[in-house]
Amino acid sequence: MSVYQATTSAPVNIACIKYWGKRDTKLILPTNSSLSVTLDQDHLRSTTTSRADPSFDKDRLWLNGIEEEIKDGGRLATCIKEMKKLRREVEDKNSNEPTLSTFAVHICSRNNFPTAAGLASSASGFAALVSSLAALYALPASPSQLSLIARQGSGSACRSLFGGFVAWEQGSLPDGSDSLAIEVAPQSHWPDIHALICVVSDDKKGTSSTSGMQRTVETSPLLQHRIKNVVPVRMEAIKKAILARDFDSFARITMQDSNQFHAVALDTDPPIFYMNDVSRAIIALVTEYNRVSVENGGTLKAAYTYDAGPNAVIYTPKENIKDIVSIIVKYFPQAEAFKDPFGLFGAQGVGEG
Ligand code: ADP
Ligand code: DP6
Ligand code: CO
């Protein structure tokens, strides 16, 4: 008897230009384009196994060992349905081969890092889900095509189908067929950039990204300014900085955009606070580190960015990692756990070693 099963994994991505706001909540179409870096090491990944079998009576999914309900019309159901649709397109109606697209699937996924804590588990999670089904169904789909489906699971997931520097172009078509991820540059274009992950808290966040951004769309006047006047300019500028390997500009734009994202969260009614005192202290340390460099005639050396949670991600050229780690450990002695990548502070390279 044949076994139809595939396992794949996908990494998280951390945005430099943040996605925050939907113009269509069902199709997950954003109010602005965004750009991220996909982390390439093993510490922050979702690994997903999908299995199709004629004896299964319904689609089921387990996340970290606990069964999640697949609600009709919900995000999981939509992704599975869209993947089965792609499979049907490649099935030969006249062959005697089993029609995999008609079998129910059982999906088992694990995150090797905290889920729903502002470390982009929805991004790696839905990217891994879509890529494991693509492998199970032996689909010839390109990463951009798969990104259209992952997007309907979680917006940020569309960017995890690519490595390196990735843009999610917001698109303008009402059916969402042009709202997809594209590669801006592969990781090999700028392997010197590393990401340092500072796990300030692994608690589940109080306000999910989905509900938080919806409240921002409904109540924040600052968001309207951001999507019209700020993001389009920053998207162009940061792409240019990446292509030119201009870390100073890359860092400036990344920090400005993280700050504006947290400003629109604060401008939401009622306000949303994702950063805490430790997050703000890390901002102060990075700011001081950069100030000293610039005062001595150098460039910015590090860029902080925070998603919907208190955990810091610091982008920096490899040569500065040691410095930054020692500064953080000096001010946060409990960060001794740094040596353990799963401890309080972990280093995550996006480049070699
Ligand atoms: P995060 O900051 O971790 O992305 P979100 O609030 O955006 O937090 O999303 C968390 C949700 O994403 C989880 O509650 C779960 O529904 C979904 N999710 C996380 N990991 C996976 C996974 N591996 N497979 C499927 N869904 C996942
Ligand atoms: C702050 O992709 O998690 O991380 O589309 O509702 O699932 P849904 O939201 P999600 O939002 C991510 C928000 C962010 C910024 C970003 O990743 O661009
Ligand atoms: Co998320």
Image (tube, helix red, strand yellow):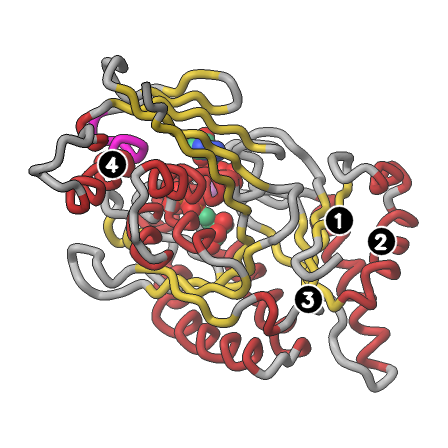
Relative to the observer, which residue lies in front, 244 or 189? 189
Q: Nearer the viewer, mark 2 or mark 1?
A: 1
Residue at the farthest left position: 94
Within 10 Å of the Cα at label 1, are there few (<14), some (14-19), or many (20+) other Cα atoms?
A: many
**Tag 3: residue type?**
Ile
What's the magenta region?
A: 72-78
Chain-order first, disc 4 or disc 2: 4
Locate the N terminus by quadrant. top left
Callout 2–callout 1 Cβ contact below 8 Å? yes
* Residue at 50% over, 76% down: 239
Chain-order first, disc 3 or disc 2: 3
Q: Which residue is mark 1?
A: 347
In the picture, the disc for residue 78 is 4
Q: CA distance from mark 4 to mark 2?
A: 42 Å
Q: Nearer the viewer, mark 3 or mark 2?
A: 3
Relative to the observer, which residue lies in front, 292 or 190? 190
Left or right relative to 148: residue 189: right
Q: CA distance from mark 3 to mark 1?
A: 13 Å
Within 10 Å of the Cα at label 3, are there few (<14), some (14-19), or many (20+) other Cα atoms?
A: many
Q: Give residue 222's quadrant in the image.
A: bottom left
In the picture, the disc for residue 184 is none
Chain-order first, disc 2 or disc 1: 2
* Residue at 22% over, 35% down: 81
**Tag 1: residue type?**
Ala
Residue 88 in picture, x, y percent from top left: 16, 40
